[in-house]
Amino acid sequence: AIFADGAAAAVITAEPAHKLPKGTLAIVDDHACLMEGTEDGITLSINDDGISCTLSKYLPQYIAKNMGSYVDTFLDRHPEVGGREGVDFWAVHPGGRRIIEEAQNGLGLSEEQCKYSWAVLEKYGNMLSPSVMFVLERIFAKHAEERALGNAGFKTGLAFSFSPGVGAEGIMLRQVNC
């Protein structure tokens, strides 16, 4: 199935970096934008049967066209990262095969760089809002595994999802106290 049910939650606290355990991946920034001319891209409506989601046939094109500038604007606020090359993990919303493909195309990412998104799509399908949290769960598990082996783990990553309009909503995570 393309669409599926899913639920996710996160407990987020505000702690000074020096109080976090060594190697913690922490949210250091967020960024949102509404892509111009994409009002038909994703529409949601509430009805007697729940929430209906309508996706425009142009949604993948909107994503391919706009994600590069979205991510570059975000990364420009963090020159210490070194642009896209300094991002070592990507949590792309697994909203469907074409959504991931066009995010890859728009950002110049490989399938390997989006492997966690592909794995969630394959196992669960698009669960709408919680989907990217399932991707992050896999990334956090891999990071913990690498840290437990004495390796560095991930240093910097971006996670993003899409909202009606089409909006892009994302967070930057960085390893602290490394």
Image (cartoon, rainbow, N blue to C red):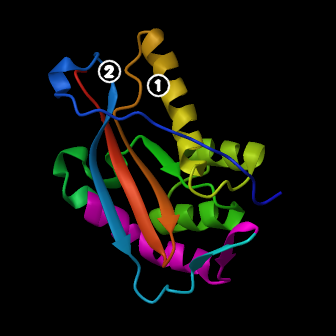
Other-residue count near label 2 (Cα within 10 Å), few / some / many at <14 / 14–19 / ≥20: some
- Give the spatial CA distance, label 2 vs label 1: 9 Å
Quarter residue 153 falls in: top left
Which residue in the protein does label 2 denote? 23
Q: Give the percent coordinates (x, y) of residue 110.
A: 56, 52
Instruction: Tell me whether the residue at label 2 lies in contact with that at label 1, contact meaning CB atoms closer than 8 angstroms.
Output: yes
Q: Which of 66 and 171 is in front in this view?
A: 171
Q: Range of the magenta residues?
A: 49-74
Residue 66 counted in the magenta span: yes
In the rendered image, the quadrant that contains the N terminus is bottom right
Q: Nearer the viewer, residue 172 or 50?
A: 50
Secondary structure of the residue carrying tag 2 is: loop
Residue 143 is labelled as 1
Quarter residue 105 falls in: bottom right
Other-residue count near label 1 (Cα within 10 Å), few / some / many at <14 / 14–19 / ≥20: many
Q: Which of 150 and 30 is in front in this view?
A: 30
Q: Which residue is drawn at 34% across and 40% down?
A: 173
Q: Look at the picture and state if 66 lies above or below 174.
A: below
